[in-house]
Image (cartoon, grey):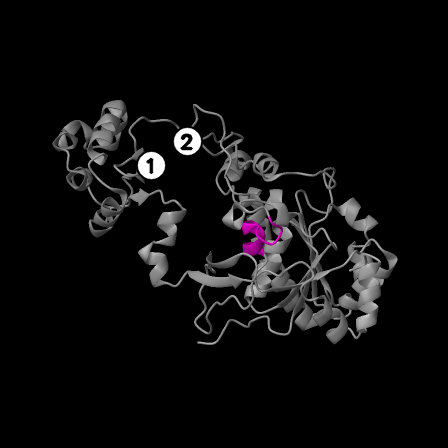
Amino acid sequence: MTPLGLLDGIRVLDLGTEVSGPFCAKLLADYGADVIKVELPGVGDPARRMGPFADDDPHPEKSIPFLYINTNKRGVTLDTRNPTGRGLLEALLQTADVLVENVPPAHAEDLGLDYAELTRNNPGLVVTSITAFGQSGPYRDYSATDLVNCAFSGLMYHTGDSDREPLRNSLNQSLYVAGINAAVATSGALLHRMATGRGQHVDVSAVECLAAHLVQPVPYYTYMGAIKGRRPVRGSGFEELMPARDGYVIPSVQGSQPWSAIAGLIGLEELHDQRFATGSGRIEHGEELKQLLIQGLAEWDRKPLFEASGESRLVFGMAQDAGDLFNCPQLRERDFFVEVDHPVAGRAEYPGMGPRLSGGVYEIRRPAPLLGQHNTEVYRDELGYSSQDLVVLMASGVI
């Protein structure tokens, strides 16, 4: 099969930092766009200093988050705060279809990255801006971390058990969700440009991307005027993580099979007691049932239990760590992992793309760029600057 090339011929300037903007640009690159990552000379994206690091070596070319988020991109250095650097950016903009940035709106205006300025000489440019709160509203210039995004969006309030404090999701999920939404909206804006010739400003709020997931609590409030709390603690052990012999599993009563099938699978005779045969009985005797489940599940390893439950048409789950995922037969069968050879960090397998298209296969065409790796290729070979120009620009700190 041929590589995915849905966005062949589209050039994206990635002026984003850390996660949300660069992840949006990575997704566009994965579908074939020519993405040029723009970083400050000598400093680079702050993500280069985000751990963990390959070989536990805190080297700017070994940040594992940076290596993953920036595959399939070329990389240049450019100080856009410098008037000469601004001229270089203008030259790049004349060749670009999309610009992605995640700078707070007021700071973006100071840097000349506001929509009106960016599109002055390129009205077909799609500008995608990703921030915590969006380009308007009283909080538009507020900064936020992933934790703040999860809390402010309402998602955190609805996560966890009702007798405990709210829980956050881990691993910067709000920033990845914002990046995904931004990539989808950017693709839509490109379709609009094909029809009209006009670009658009794609305004992405990480908080709103998460709040849009609250498909039960918000309508519950608007229809009923009531706050839907976190899930009640029933004590029966179902729909929650419980210990198996080698980790954690999630026993479930979801599905069409009777209680006797669940009790038979776990294999503990006491679970066949008629007190547990109905949902109300399992709630009434929840604490006793939970202890029996712990006793029965302790005889199982996660994977055999998960596979046996599937064969019995039961809906059980198992909590997988990174090693489990890496060796998961389901993901291996679908070639989810892709090998990447980086000139500094070395060879490793990276997570691939979730969606599959019948007309092409996902590939990582190039590893994450070294800082300024493609300066000569982009500035000299494509924009027409001379080698001497590049020497001067480098000496003056512009690139």
Q: Is any part of residue 42 visible from this angle?
A: yes
Label 1 element class? loop
Q: x and y percent of residue 259 in the render? A: 19, 38
Work out whether 290 lies above or below 172.
Answer: above
Q: Is residue 168 left or right of residue 321?
A: right
Q: x and y percent of residue 83 in the render? A: 87, 58
Work out whether 161 lies above or below 397.
Answer: above
Label 2 element class? loop
Question: Image point 62% across, 55% down: which residue?
Answer: 22
Amino acid carrying label 2: it is Arg
Work out whether 223 lies above or below 257.
Answer: above
Q: Real-space Cα distance between discs 2 and 1?
A: 10 Å
Name the residue tied to disc 2.
231
**Between marks 2 and 1 in the image, the one whose residue lies nearer the viewer:** 1
Labelled disc at residue 239: 1
Question: Image point 21% across, 39% down: which residue?
Answer: 300
**Of the residues under marks 2 and 1, which one precedes in the sequence?**
2
Q: Is any part of residue 197 visible from this angle?
A: no
